[in-house]
Amino acid sequence: MGRAVVACGLLLLVLSGAAWAQEVVDGTSATSTTSGISQYLPLIILLVAFGGIFYFMLIRPQRKRQQEMNTLLSGLKRGDKVMTAGGIIAEIDSIGDTSVVLLLEEGSKLRMAKASIVRKLDK
């Protein structure tokens, strides 16, 4: 997927460079009398294209992951078996606003931040 982004970027760069190139006629450069927005149109197209690439490659997937994490954390209940970011597998004993109390296999309890839970496991 990274190669596709580089290829698209290079293609857009070449297209914008070609639009900015001056036309050479008989060894002398012909100047165009473009004015206003048409002079900056290739640059604007390039910036919009890169903005779209950044949105679809970086921002959109991150929002999707964040929404999935919020759904996971809001759906937790007592008795669910979960895995934390540190690899601890435990059962939820109680849930607070920002923390959870986990019941480990040997009966000990551990209070952790709610955000450290990364996955809900099957019982």
Image (cartoon, helix red, strand yellow):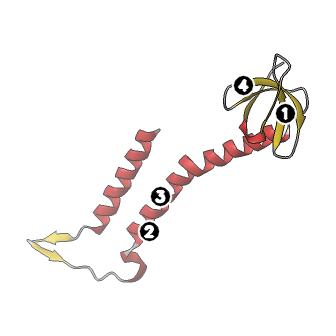
Q: List x then y, in percent, for residue 115.
A: 74, 41
Q: Earlier in the sequence, mark 2 or mark 4?
A: 2
Residue 44, label in figure: 2
Q: Earlier in the sequence, mark 1 or mark 2?
A: 2
Q: List x then y, in percent, for residue 63.
A: 66, 48
Q: List x then y, in percent, for residue 3.
A: 40, 40
Q: Residues within 10 Å of mark 1 (few under 14, many from 20)?
A: some
Q: Are marks 2 and 4 in contact (CB under 8 Å)?
A: no
Among all residues in the image, which is located at the extreme front?
108
On screen, residue 29 versus residue 98, left or right, reads: left
Q: Earlier in the sequence, mark 1 or mark 4?
A: 4
Q: Nearer the observer, disc 1 or disc 2?
A: 1
* Kind of element beneath mark 1: strand
The image quadrant of residue 28 is: bottom left
| Real-space CA distance between mark 3 and mark 2, rounded to the nearest whole angstrom | 9 Å
Q: What type is the residue that disc 4 sits on? A: Ile
* Kind of element beneath mark 3: helix
Identified at 31% across, 56% down, the residue is 14
Q: Residues within 10 Å of mark 4 (few under 14, many from 20)?
A: few
For disc 3, the marked residue is 49
For disc 4, the marked residue is 88
Q: Earlier in the sequence, mark 3 or mark 4?
A: 3
* Kind of element beneath mark 2: helix
Identified at 8% across, 71% down, the residue is 27
Q: Residues within 10 Å of mark 2 (few under 14, many from 20)?
A: some
Q: Are marks 1 and 4 in contact (CB under 8 Å)?
A: no
Q: How many marks?
A: 4
For disc 1, the marked residue is 101
Q: Earlier in the sequence, mark 1 or mark 3?
A: 3
Q: Residues within 10 Å of mark 3 (few under 14, many from 20)?
A: some
Identified at 22% across, 70% down, the residue is 22
